[in-house]
Image (spheres, grey):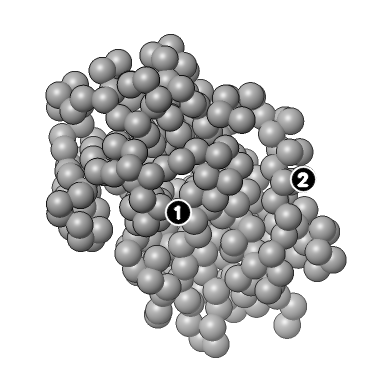
Amino acid sequence: MSKHYAVFGHPVAHSLSPRIHAAFGRQVGIPVDYVAIDAEPSTFEEALSAFAERGGAGANITSPLKEVAFTLCSDATERARRAGAANTLVRNGDTWHGDNTDGAGLVRDLTGRHALDLRARRTLLIGAGGAARGVAPELLDAGIGDLFIVNRTSHRTDALVDLLGQPGRVHPRYIDDLAALGEFDLIVNATSAGRAGQLLHLPPSLVGRRTAAVDLNYGEAAIPFLAWARANGCHDMIDGLGMLVEQAAISFARWHGVEPDTDPVYGELRAEHARLVTAD
Ligand code: ATR
């Protein structure tokens, strides 16, 4: 049976992942069969089983399915366990092995492509869903300073803070208390608000002299937060396009055993997307 790959999410029709994986495949000479499959949390388990029966060998998982995907894995990498969320599944016999390449992809993009030094940055993470969970452990490992986490639904903040297990360094706060938190060197928007056309209400007092604002979304969805960052004098504004390409490359290497060159694929996509990045 030939091997199939897919990205699952809801909505997922506009995902760039099929295009990115096809481009990587062409680059390294591996034909890649990779499609987008729309599934809601309630139908995902069934859709994933059907995919496995058709020869599904690997899957990427996007919003809002990363946490439920993790629960469907028989085993997982340490970074996926630390996140409690999976964005990459590898078929292993009759079971799924979970990984999470989001955090490594983000750190590669920020430190490599954009040459940001993350060390000791006082960091605010907005959101506590699957995307926030994926990036928090790797940001901590990259040497950021204290990490403050806020989320519209506070019990999800608490669950993520508990999972990260660094009480002296990771602090839950209420989203309504943002104005009392002072300035941050790094602000990461890991919410899906922009994708729903909704605005986050963020006080200008979060911004300091060298604040980098990073949105894990790309395209239209990243515009509201990065426009706020620009209007309030952030030093760097970075969308999630580079992270998307980097996390895809790490997933690709897990499935096919070859590490693709991300620069040409990033360059092509960047040329088509609103120029929201000002750190490079
Ligand atoms: P993803 O994989 O993109 O993280 P998710 O797990 O559904 O998808 O999480 C979405 C995140 O965006 C959550 O942190 C969510 O907050 P809740 O936990 O309160 O739902 C956040 N979010 C979505 N819309 C938002 C809005 N309008 N304002 C603030 N946060 C929002």
Q: In the picture, residue 260 is in which quadrant? A: bottom right
Q: Position of residue 151 (x, y in %)?
A: 25, 38
The disc, 2 or 1, on the residue closer to the chain's N-terminal end is 1
Q: Which residue is mark 2?
A: 264
Quarter holding the N terminus is bottom right
User: Gap between marks 2 and 1, in whole Å?
Assistant: 21 Å
Mark 2 C-beta closer than 8 Å to ligand 1:
no
What kind of element bears circle 2? helix
- Depth check: give the residue in front, 101 or 40: 101
Q: Relative to 45, does residue 129 appear above or below in the rendering?
A: above
The structure residue drawn at horizontal position 77% and vertical position 53%, both measured from the top left corner, is 23
Q: Which kind of residue does numbered mark 1 sit on?
A: Gly
Q: Position of residue 30 (x, y in %)?
A: 80, 68
Determine crowd level at label 1: few under 14, some 14-19, many 20+ residues with C-alpha closer than 10 A.
many
Q: Which residue is mark 1?
A: 103
- Depth check: give the residue in front, 80 or 12: 80
Q: Which mark is residue 279?
A: none
Quarter holding the C terminus is top right
Q: Relative to 227, does residue 161 appear above or below in the rendering?
A: below
The structure residue drawn at horizontal position 82% and vertical position 58%, both measured from the top left corner, is 27
For the residues labelled 2 and 1, say whether their Cβ atoms are less than 8 Å apart: no
Q: Relative to 144, does residue 67 appear above or below in the rendering?
A: below
The structure residue drawn at horizontal position 64% and vertical position 58%, both measured from the top left corner, is 249
The structure residue drawn at horizontal position 34% and vertical position 60%, both measured from the top left corner, is 83
Specify whether residue 25 is in view.
Answer: yes
Q: Which kind of residue does numbered mark 2 sit on?
A: Pro
Mark 1 C-beta closer than 8 Å to ligand 1:
no
Q: Position of residue 165 (x, y in %)?
A: 20, 60
- Depth check: give the residue in front, 45 or 65: 65
Q: In the picture, residue 178 is in which quadrant? A: top left
